Image: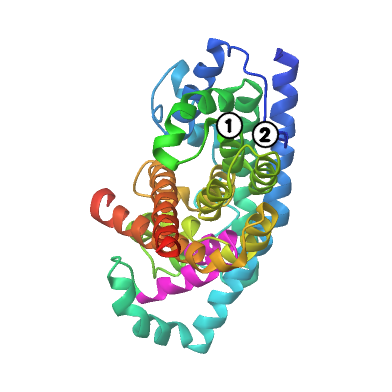
Amino acid sequence: MSSQGNLYAAFVEGSIKGWKVATQNMLPNVVLAFVFIQMLQLSGLLDSIGEYCAPLMNLFGLPGEAITVLISTWFSAGGGVGAAAGLYTHGIMSSRDITIIMPGIFLMGAQIQYAGRILGVAGVPSKHYPILYAIGLFNAAMGMLTMKWFFV
Amino acid sequence: MPSTRPNSPDGALPWSAYVALIVTILFFSGAFSGVHGILGCLDFTALSGSFGKIAGEFTFVGRGGTGARYGFLFALSLVPGIMLALAVVEVAERLQALRAAQRLLTPLMRPLLGLPGAAGLALISSLQSSDAGAAMTRTLYDEGLISEKEKLLFAAFQFSSASSITVYLSMGVALFPFLSVSHLIPLGVILFYKVVGTNLMRLYLHLLQRKNNV
C-alpha cells in the first residue's frame, strides 16, 4: 500500500496543502488581526479594553488586553493566533501569557464558522446550539486555567 | 484527504503503522530537540531550520514593525513551518499512523465518549478535517450506525477545537516560538477538554431526557 514513491508524493501533497492553508486561511487572518490590534493601539482603545477586562482576564493570569485574542479567535483561530502574536510583538503579552492562552484560542476557535460547517452538516437541531457554544467556551476557560495551574 | 466513507475494512495493520504513529508524535513533541546524531533530525523545530540573518542580527521580518505590513511578513515567515507540518502529517497518514491511532482508540470510545467503535474513523478524521468529520457523522447517522443522542455527543466533540490537529499545526505554529512548554502540551490539554466537553453534553442530554420523562 505504501511504497517509497508514495511517501515522496505524500510529502509533496502535504506541503501543497500547507501552502494553501497558509496563504488562503492563515495569512489573511493574521494580517487582519495585526490591523485590528494596530487600530486598537492607535485609537487608544487597547488601553481602555485592557483596563476594563483586567479583572476577568486576571482570573487566567493574563493581561486585560488578551481579551482581544479571545474575541478574534471566536471568528477565526488564525485571527486569534495573529492577535496573540501582535500583542507579543508589542510587548503586551509574555511568553508565559501565550502559553496560557494557547489552548483557549483553539477550544473556542471559529465557533461562528463551525456552527454551519459542523453542526449544520451533521444535522444538529438548532435548539442544542446554545449548550454546544457554552461547552466550547467552558472548555476554553478550563484549558487556560489548566495551563496556568499546571504548566507555567 | 481522508475518505468520507465511515466504514472501512478491518484488515490487520502492519506494525509500521504503530511505529509511524509514535514517531510522528515524538517528532512534534520536541522530544529529540537538541539530540545529536540520527535522532536529532526527527525534530520539527530542527527541520524547520531558521531564516538567514540580515546584517548579522535580524531575519527579514525585522524588528519593530506594525500593522498589515508587519502582519504580512510575520505570516510569511510561518509558511515553511506549516508546509513541513502538514507534509509530515500526510506522510504519517500514508503510513497508516492515523489508522493505528483509530485502532488504539476504538475500545476507549464507549467509556470515554459514549460513542460506538464504528465512529472511530470519523473521530480520527474529524481531528484532521472538520468537514470530513461532519460529513462522516451525517453518513453514520443516516446509515443508522449512530443514534440521535450519539450524533449530538459526537457534534459536541467536534465543535470545540474543530480539526484540532490540522488547525493546531497550521495556525498554532505561529505561536510555537513563544511557548514556554513543549509544543504538544497545549494540544494535549485541548484534546483532554474535548473529551470533558463531550461528557458535559452527555450529562446535559441525560438531564434533559429525565426531565422529559417526568
| Quadrant of the rendering where the N terminus of chain A is positioned | top right
Q: CA distance from mark 1 to mark 2?
A: 8 Å
Disc number for residue B6: 2
Q: Earlier in the sequence, mark 1 or mark 2?
A: 2
- Disc 1 marks which amino acid? Ala
- Please name the colour scheme applied to the rendered image: rainbow
Quarter location, residue A27: bottom right
Residue B168 higher or lower than B26, as above or below: below
Magenta span includes A8: no
Q: How many marks?
A: 2
Residue A55 higher or lower than B75, as above or below: below
Whether residue B109 is visible to the viewer of this picture, yes or no, is yes
Give neighbour class at mark 1: few <14, some 14-19, many 20+ (Cα, 10 Å): some
The range drawn in magenta is A64-85
Please tell me which residue is depicted at 65% across the width and 53% down the height of the picture. Answer: B76
Please tell me which residue is depicted at 44% across the width and 58% down the height of the picture. Answer: B209
Q: Nearer the viewer, residue A21 or B112?
A: B112
Q: Secondary structure at mark 1?
A: helix
The chief SS type of the magenta part is helix
Residue A27 higher or lower than B66, as above or below: above
Mark 1, residue position: B118
Quarter location, residue B88: top right
